[in-house]
Image (tube, rainbow, N blue to C red):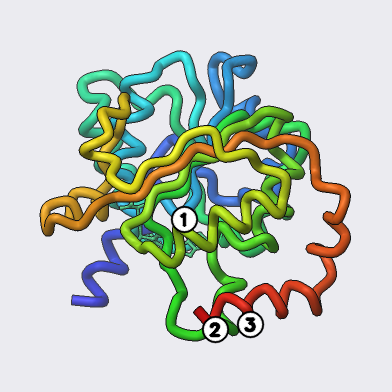
Protein backbone atom coordinates (compact mmCIF):
# COMPACT_ATOMS: atom_id res chain seq x y z
CA UNK A 1 0.00 0.00 0.00
CA UNK A 2 2.80 2.35 0.97
CA UNK A 3 4.63 1.65 -2.32
CA UNK A 4 1.49 2.21 -4.39
CA UNK A 5 0.83 5.51 -2.62
CA UNK A 6 4.39 6.68 -3.24
CA UNK A 7 4.25 5.56 -6.85
CA UNK A 8 1.14 7.63 -7.45
CA UNK A 9 2.34 10.81 -5.73
CA UNK A 10 5.34 11.76 -7.83
CA UNK A 11 3.77 11.38 -11.30
CA UNK A 12 0.79 13.40 -10.07
CA UNK A 13 3.00 16.23 -8.83
CA UNK A 14 5.25 16.15 -11.89
CA UNK A 15 2.26 16.47 -14.20
CA UNK A 16 0.72 19.28 -12.13
CA UNK A 17 1.33 22.58 -13.96
CA UNK A 18 0.80 24.59 -10.77
CA UNK A 19 3.10 22.58 -8.46
CA UNK A 20 6.38 24.39 -7.69
CA UNK A 21 9.22 21.91 -7.17
CA UNK A 22 11.88 24.32 -5.87
CA UNK A 23 10.16 26.83 -3.55
CA UNK A 24 13.39 28.46 -2.34
CA UNK A 25 14.10 29.55 -5.91
CA UNK A 26 10.75 31.40 -5.95
CA UNK A 27 11.56 33.44 -2.82
CA UNK A 28 10.42 37.01 -3.49
CA UNK A 29 9.00 36.03 -6.91
CA UNK A 30 5.83 34.04 -6.21
CA UNK A 31 3.59 36.70 -7.75
CA UNK A 32 5.24 36.28 -11.13
CA UNK A 33 3.79 32.77 -11.42
CA UNK A 34 0.26 34.13 -11.76
CA UNK A 35 -1.41 35.59 -14.86
CA UNK A 36 -2.39 38.67 -12.81
CA UNK A 37 0.61 39.22 -10.46
CA UNK A 38 -0.77 42.42 -8.91
CA UNK A 39 -3.78 40.72 -7.38
CA UNK A 40 -3.71 40.07 -3.61
CA UNK A 41 -1.60 37.06 -2.66
CA UNK A 42 -2.81 34.76 0.12
CA UNK A 43 -0.88 31.87 1.64
CA UNK A 44 -2.21 28.71 3.28
CA UNK A 45 0.17 26.83 5.55
CA UNK A 46 -0.48 23.12 6.16
CA UNK A 47 -3.16 22.86 3.49
CA UNK A 48 -3.33 19.06 3.69
CA UNK A 49 -5.52 17.60 0.97
CA UNK A 50 -6.63 21.10 0.01
CA UNK A 51 -10.38 20.52 0.28
CA UNK A 52 -11.10 24.07 1.49
CA UNK A 53 -8.16 25.47 -0.50
CA UNK A 54 -9.70 24.38 -3.78
CA UNK A 55 -13.10 25.83 -2.89
CA UNK A 56 -11.57 29.10 -1.68
CA UNK A 57 -9.50 29.56 -4.85
CA UNK A 58 -12.43 28.65 -7.11
CA UNK A 59 -14.72 31.11 -5.31
CA UNK A 60 -12.24 34.01 -5.37
CA UNK A 61 -10.83 34.29 -8.90
CA UNK A 62 -9.46 37.78 -8.18
CA UNK A 63 -7.13 36.49 -5.47
CA UNK A 64 -3.91 34.53 -6.01
CA UNK A 65 -3.23 31.64 -3.64
CA UNK A 66 -0.15 29.69 -2.66
CA UNK A 67 -0.84 26.60 -0.53
CA UNK A 68 2.01 24.74 1.14
CA UNK A 69 2.39 21.54 3.11
CA UNK A 70 5.43 19.56 4.15
CA UNK A 71 3.97 16.25 2.91
CA UNK A 72 4.16 15.62 -0.82
CA UNK A 73 1.44 12.98 -0.84
CA UNK A 74 -1.23 15.29 0.55
CA UNK A 75 -0.19 17.92 -2.01
CA UNK A 76 -0.75 15.36 -4.77
CA UNK A 77 -4.27 14.81 -3.39
CA UNK A 78 -4.71 18.60 -3.16
CA UNK A 79 -3.88 18.94 -6.85
CA UNK A 80 -6.53 16.37 -7.72
CA UNK A 81 -9.07 18.19 -5.56
CA UNK A 82 -8.22 21.52 -7.21
CA UNK A 83 -8.45 20.02 -10.70
CA UNK A 84 -11.92 18.73 -9.84
CA UNK A 85 -13.06 22.01 -8.27
CA UNK A 86 -12.03 24.01 -11.36
CA UNK A 87 -13.10 21.51 -14.04
CA UNK A 88 -13.66 21.96 -16.92
CA UNK A 89 -11.47 25.09 -16.56
CA UNK A 90 -7.77 24.75 -15.68
CA UNK A 91 -6.66 25.80 -12.20
CA UNK A 92 -5.67 29.44 -12.66
CA UNK A 93 -5.10 31.18 -9.33
CA UNK A 94 -3.53 28.48 -7.14
CA UNK A 95 0.05 27.29 -6.68
CA UNK A 96 1.00 24.27 -4.54
CA UNK A 97 4.44 23.63 -3.10
CA UNK A 98 6.17 21.42 -0.53
CA UNK A 99 7.57 23.67 2.19
CA UNK A 100 8.35 22.94 5.84
CA UNK A 101 6.88 25.97 7.63
CA UNK A 102 9.63 25.78 10.26
CA UNK A 103 11.92 27.19 7.54
CA UNK A 104 9.37 29.32 5.73
CA UNK A 105 11.54 32.43 5.62
CA UNK A 106 13.84 30.56 3.21
CA UNK A 107 10.99 30.42 0.67
CA UNK A 108 9.03 33.67 1.21
CA UNK A 109 10.34 37.25 1.32
CA UNK A 110 8.94 40.76 1.94
CA UNK A 111 8.65 41.19 -1.86
CA UNK A 112 5.95 38.49 -1.92
CA UNK A 113 3.63 40.89 -0.04
CA UNK A 114 1.23 38.29 1.36
CA UNK A 115 -2.03 39.89 2.53
CA UNK A 116 -3.69 36.90 4.19
CA UNK A 117 -2.45 33.79 5.91
CA UNK A 118 -4.68 30.74 6.44
CA UNK A 119 -3.85 28.11 9.07
CA UNK A 120 -6.50 25.44 9.59
CA UNK A 121 -6.31 22.56 12.05
CA UNK A 122 -2.56 22.43 12.55
CA UNK A 123 -1.17 19.71 14.79
CA UNK A 124 -1.72 21.10 18.36
CA UNK A 125 1.51 19.62 19.82
CA UNK A 126 -0.05 19.70 23.30
CA UNK A 127 1.44 16.52 24.80
CA UNK A 128 4.87 17.97 25.73
CA UNK A 129 5.74 21.61 26.28
CA UNK A 130 9.13 21.09 24.63
CA UNK A 131 7.18 20.49 21.41
CA UNK A 132 5.21 23.76 21.54
CA UNK A 133 7.79 25.44 19.37
CA UNK A 134 6.65 23.21 16.48
CA UNK A 135 3.20 24.80 16.52
CA UNK A 136 2.45 26.73 13.34
CA UNK A 137 1.18 29.63 15.49
CA UNK A 138 4.14 29.70 17.92
CA UNK A 139 6.02 33.03 18.21
CA UNK A 140 8.98 31.42 16.43
CA UNK A 141 6.64 31.05 13.44
CA UNK A 142 4.79 34.35 13.77
CA UNK A 143 8.12 36.17 13.76
CA UNK A 144 8.92 34.56 10.42
CA UNK A 145 5.45 35.25 8.96
CA UNK A 146 5.78 38.94 9.80
CA UNK A 147 8.65 39.20 7.34
CA UNK A 148 6.53 38.51 4.24
CA UNK A 149 3.12 39.79 5.40
CA UNK A 150 2.06 43.33 4.43
CA UNK A 151 1.12 45.73 7.27
CA UNK A 152 -2.51 45.11 8.19
CA UNK A 153 -2.38 41.56 6.78
CA UNK A 154 -4.83 39.08 8.27
CA UNK A 155 -4.14 35.69 9.78
CA UNK A 156 -7.15 33.35 9.78
CA UNK A 157 -6.82 30.46 12.21
CA UNK A 158 -9.15 27.51 12.83
CA UNK A 159 -8.81 24.64 15.27
CA UNK A 160 -10.84 22.21 17.34
CA UNK A 161 -8.20 22.33 20.11
CA UNK A 162 -9.07 24.66 23.01
CA UNK A 163 -5.60 24.89 24.64
CA UNK A 164 -3.95 25.54 21.25
CA UNK A 165 -6.53 28.23 20.49
CA UNK A 166 -5.98 29.98 23.81
CA UNK A 167 -2.18 29.77 23.58
CA UNK A 168 -2.32 31.05 20.00
CA UNK A 169 -4.26 34.14 21.09
CA UNK A 170 -1.40 34.90 23.50
CA UNK A 171 1.25 34.18 20.86
CA UNK A 172 -0.49 36.52 18.40
CA UNK A 173 -0.78 39.40 20.87
CA UNK A 174 2.86 38.97 21.90
CA UNK A 175 3.93 39.25 18.29
CA UNK A 176 1.92 42.34 17.40
CA UNK A 177 -1.26 40.84 15.93
CA UNK A 178 -4.61 42.31 17.01
CA UNK A 179 -7.46 39.84 17.24
CA UNK A 180 -10.30 41.47 15.32
CA UNK A 181 -12.76 38.55 15.27
CA UNK A 182 -13.08 35.36 17.25
CA UNK A 183 -15.65 32.70 17.94
CA UNK A 184 -15.71 29.50 19.96
CA UNK A 185 -18.22 27.97 17.56
CA UNK A 186 -17.58 28.91 13.96
CA UNK A 187 -20.45 26.91 12.52
CA UNK A 188 -22.99 28.48 14.87
CA UNK A 189 -21.54 31.97 14.42
CA UNK A 190 -22.93 32.81 11.00
CA UNK A 191 -19.45 33.84 9.80
CA UNK A 192 -19.24 33.76 6.01
CA UNK A 193 -17.76 32.84 3.69
CA UNK A 194 -16.36 29.78 5.40
CA UNK A 195 -14.58 27.16 3.32
CA UNK A 196 -14.82 23.85 5.18
CA UNK A 197 -11.58 21.86 5.32
CA UNK A 198 -11.19 18.11 5.54
CA UNK A 199 -10.48 18.14 9.28
CA UNK A 200 -13.15 20.76 9.94
CA UNK A 201 -15.78 18.51 8.35
CA UNK A 202 -14.50 15.59 10.42
CA UNK A 203 -14.64 17.38 13.78
CA UNK A 204 -17.84 19.28 13.07
CA UNK A 205 -19.43 15.96 12.09
CA UNK A 206 -18.54 14.67 15.57
CA UNK A 207 -20.21 17.70 17.18
CA UNK A 208 -16.90 19.33 18.19
CA UNK A 209 -17.14 23.15 18.09
CA UNK A 210 -14.67 24.83 15.74
CA UNK A 211 -12.65 27.73 17.18
CA UNK A 212 -11.85 30.48 14.72
CA UNK A 213 -10.13 33.85 14.82
CA UNK A 214 -8.92 36.60 12.53
CA UNK A 215 -5.86 38.55 13.66
CA UNK A 216 -4.57 41.68 11.95
CA UNK A 217 -0.84 42.42 11.82
CA UNK A 218 -0.04 45.68 13.60
CA UNK A 219 3.26 47.11 14.82
CA UNK A 220 5.57 44.94 16.84
CA UNK A 221 5.23 45.55 20.59
CA UNK A 222 8.07 47.48 22.24
CA UNK A 223 9.14 44.33 24.13
CA UNK A 224 9.47 42.26 20.98
CA UNK A 225 13.16 41.61 21.62
CA UNK A 226 12.11 40.08 24.91
CA UNK A 227 9.97 37.63 22.99
CA UNK A 228 12.75 36.96 20.49
CA UNK A 229 15.14 35.85 23.21
CA UNK A 230 15.34 32.05 23.09
CA UNK A 231 15.45 31.65 26.87
CA UNK A 232 12.29 33.67 27.38
CA UNK A 233 10.49 31.66 24.72
CA UNK A 234 11.32 28.57 26.76
CA UNK A 235 9.79 30.30 29.78
CA UNK A 236 6.60 30.94 27.82
CA UNK A 237 6.36 27.25 27.06
CA UNK A 238 6.99 26.20 30.65
CA UNK A 239 4.30 28.59 31.91
CA UNK A 240 1.81 27.11 29.46
CA UNK A 241 2.60 23.54 30.46
CA UNK A 242 1.67 24.36 34.07
CA UNK A 243 -1.96 24.98 33.07
C1 LIG B 1 -4.30 18.06 10.66
S1 LIG B 1 -3.77 18.46 9.04
C2 LIG B 1 -4.87 19.76 8.54
C3 LIG B 1 -5.00 19.83 7.05
C4 LIG B 1 -6.00 20.89 6.55
N1 LIG B 1 -5.53 22.23 6.84
C5 LIG B 1 -7.37 20.67 7.15
O1 LIG B 1 -7.83 21.55 7.89
O2 LIG B 1 -7.98 19.64 6.84
C6 LIG B 1 -2.26 19.36 9.34
C7 LIG B 1 -1.44 19.54 8.09
O3 LIG B 1 -0.34 20.38 8.40
C8 LIG B 1 0.80 19.87 7.75
N2 LIG B 1 1.99 20.32 8.48
C9 LIG B 1 2.35 20.01 9.74
N3 LIG B 1 3.51 20.59 10.08
C10 LIG B 1 3.90 21.31 9.00
C11 LIG B 1 5.02 22.12 8.70
N4 LIG B 1 5.99 22.30 9.60
N5 LIG B 1 5.10 22.70 7.49
C12 LIG B 1 4.13 22.51 6.56
N6 LIG B 1 3.05 21.74 6.77
C13 LIG B 1 2.93 21.15 7.97
C14 LIG B 1 0.62 18.36 7.79
O4 LIG B 1 1.40 17.69 6.80
C15 LIG B 1 -0.87 18.23 7.54
O5 LIG B 1 -1.17 18.11 6.17
Q: Is residue 187 left or right of residue 19?
A: left
Of residues 92 and 12, the one nearer the viewer is 92
Judging by the rendered image, the residue that carries numbered circle 2 is 242
Q: Is residue 4 left or right of residue 21?
A: left
Residue 227 or 201: which is nearer the viewer? Answer: 227
* N-term mark: 2 or 1: 1
**Res 163 label:** none
Q: Using a 10 Å C-alpha cutoff, classify the residue at mark 1 as few (fewer than 14 neighbours), some (14 to 19) or many (20 or more).
A: many
Q: Are marks 1 and 3 in contact (CB under 8 Å)?
A: no
Local SS, label 1: strand
Furthest-front residue in view? 243
Q: Which residue is mark 3?
A: 238
Q: CA distance from mark 1 to mark 3?
A: 28 Å
Q: Residue at x 73, y 54 (%)?
A: 143
Counting from the top left corner in percent of width and height, residue 243 is at 50, 78
Look at the numbered disc 1 and say if its residue's Cβ is closer than 8 Å to ligand 1. Answer: yes
Disc 3 versus disc 2: distance between alpha carbons?
7 Å
Drawn side of residue 4 relative to residue 72, left or right: left
**Do labels 3 and 2 touch, CB within 8 Å?**
yes
Label 3 crowd bin: few (<14), some (14–19), many (20+), radius 10 Å: some
Q: Quadrant of ligand 1?
A: bottom left
For disc 1, the marked residue is 69
Amino acid sequence: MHIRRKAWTEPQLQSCAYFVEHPRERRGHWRELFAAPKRPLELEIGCGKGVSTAQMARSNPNVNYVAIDEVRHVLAVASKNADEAFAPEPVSNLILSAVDAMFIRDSFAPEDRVSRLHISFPNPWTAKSKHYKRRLTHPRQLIQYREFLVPGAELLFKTDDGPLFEDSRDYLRMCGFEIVYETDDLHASGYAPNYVSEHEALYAGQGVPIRFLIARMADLPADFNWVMNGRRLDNIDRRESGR
